[in-house]
Each structure stands twice: as structure tokens, then as C-alpha cells.
Amino acid sequence: MGWRMADQGWRKGPWTPAEDKLLAEYVALHGEGRWSSVAGYTGLKRNGKSCRLRWVNYLRPGLKKGQLSPQEEGIIIELHALWGNKWSTIARYLPGRTDNEIKNYWRTHFKNSGKPLQHEKKRKYETHLSYNQEQQVYRAMNTASSSESEENYGGMITEPSQSKLQETTAVAWPEATMEQQQQNPCVMAQDVARWWDTVSEDGLWSGFLWNQELNHPNQAAIEQSFSPCY
DNA sequence: AAAAGTACCAACCGCCGGTAG
DNA sequence: ACTACCGGCGGTTGGTACTTT
């Protein structure tokens, strides 16, 4: 396809600072998009796909660097339970984080059949996530997916459960009206994070979320009104 | 101190959906 | 309706840093 063009001549591997600079200048001038034109404009020997990826995952302004906060970790766990490997969807609720970052995080921390990795526990920045708490989450997740099998846990629950996120949001910010939620979903997501901070510190985690009814009475309205941070 | 094992992360690959011609 | 291109997504890989033995 377009990305492939003539597959010869494209540079691969790690980006150099000079390449980053050229790409950043291009985006500053022309904006995001038209990635396949980057090589022509800048002289970069990178295909459009590679340029887009570099921009989205590394150069784009506003990206957060460094480890994920405990609340971000919690949100990832929560949203992954809702949507499965919809990394880009999950990323929309974590401003400054990329789908790639979240995907890597998940693989690193949870690919090992649901148990936290050994090294994980020793890392200094690791969090309030005690093993027991995680076990709680996994139990809760299994309950939510109405299956004990791990494949199901990996394959996952489907999109309609957006309503559960909405409920999460509603719990986080009960005083918010539907209009408020609709107007400022980003703020809502941040409030989920704030809420998570509180809940995780209390050791309650979010197990209770999974006890909520799957079919919220206002699910249709909720799904219609809720939108992530794009 | 060195080798082996493990974790992390940037980047690539293949596929898919949307769209313009 | 068909085709080619573009943009985006999820899965995977490879290099490197860090930890353990």
C-alpha cells in the first residue's frame, strides 16, 4: 500500500536527534498528517508510517515521560478489564500516554498469567499495588467477565461496557451532571484518576465496580453522552 | 567481575477501515 | 463499483539496561 511504496531506501532502527528535529520541524510547518510527504519535504529517509509512529509515541507535545502513577495503573487495569486490548481507546483516557506505552506496560506487568513479575515487586517506584490487592482485582475481573478462563480474560469484554466506565466516572464525580460530563470528558477522566488515588489508598480498589449491574438503566443515554479525550 | 537472566521500551510489521479518484 | 492510498491499530521483535547468581 501507500506506506510500502518502494520498499527500498527507507532507513530503519532508532531515530537520531537530527531526524527528530527534521520531523518536528515538518509537523510545526504542515501539521500532523500527510505522513507520506515527510520524506519528500524533509529529506528524511523514513517512510510515512515510521514518521507518524515516531511523532505520536515520542515527539508529540504533551507526552508524559517516566513511570505511570498508581492511579494511571489503576485506570489501565480498569479499562483493560472493560475493553481488553483496545490500547488506543484506553490511551484516550490517559492524557499524555500513548497506546504503545500502555501496551508495553500491560505486557510487562501482566503477561505473566496475571501474576505480578518478581522484579516488579522490587522496583522502587512500584506503588501501593500489593499482591493481595492485585489478586482482588483479578478475582473481580474474572467475575466481571463471567468466566474463569484466562483466555477470556485475554480476549476480553466488549465495548458496550463503556457504561461501566461511565459509572466509574459517576462514582468519581457524583455531583457532575450529564451535561458536565458531556462537556468535559477529559476532566472526568482526571477525576477518575483522583478518585482512584483515594480508593486505592484505602485498600478498597475497585472491586465494587464489578458488582454493579452490567446493564445500567440509562446505558443508552450514557453511551451516547460519554466521550473520551481525543 | 563476569555471565546469565529478566525487564523495559522503541520501533517494525501486517492488517483493516475510510476515502478520494 | 473498484482501486489505490492514507492513517491507524494491535501484535511482535530486537536492543539495551538492569538485576541476579
Image: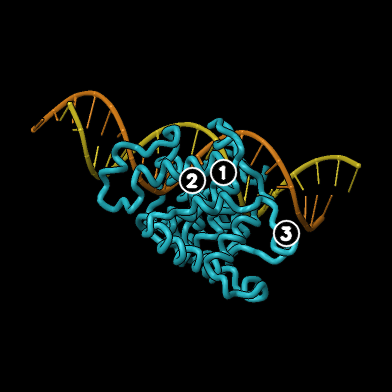
Chain colours: A cyan, B orange, C yellow
- Gap in Å between the C-alphas at discs 2 and 1? 8 Å
Q: Name the one closer to the observer, A112 or A149.
A: A149
Contact? badges 2 and 1 (CB < 8 Å): yes
Q: Nearer the viewer, mark 2 or mark 3?
A: 3
- Gap in Å between the C-alphas at discs 3 and 1? 27 Å
Amino acid at the residue labelled 1? Asn
Which chain hosts label 1?
A
Residue A209 percent coordinates (x, y) = 55, 53
Say which label, 2 or 3, has the lower sequence index. 2
Which chain hosts label 3?
A
* Quadrant location of the C terminus of chain A in the rendered image: bottom right
Amino acid at the residue labelled 2? Lys
User: Residue sitting at 72 percent across and 59 percent down?
Assistant: A217
Q: Name the one closer to the observer, A135 or A189.
A: A135
In the picture of the structure, the residue carrying the numbered disc 3 is: A217
Say which label, 2 or 1, has the lower sequence index. 1
Q: Is residue A5 left or right of residue C16?
A: right
Q: Dot 3: what SS?
A: loop
Q: Which numbered marker is on residue A85? A: 1
Callouts 2 and 3 in the same chain: yes
> For residue B15, which quarter of the picture?
top right
- Gap in Å between the C-alphas at discs 2 and 3? 32 Å
In the picture of the structure, the residue carrying the numbered disc 2 is: A103
* Quadrant location of the N terminus of chain A in the rendered image: top right
Callouts 2 and 1 in the same chain: yes
Amino acid at the residue labelled 3? Pro
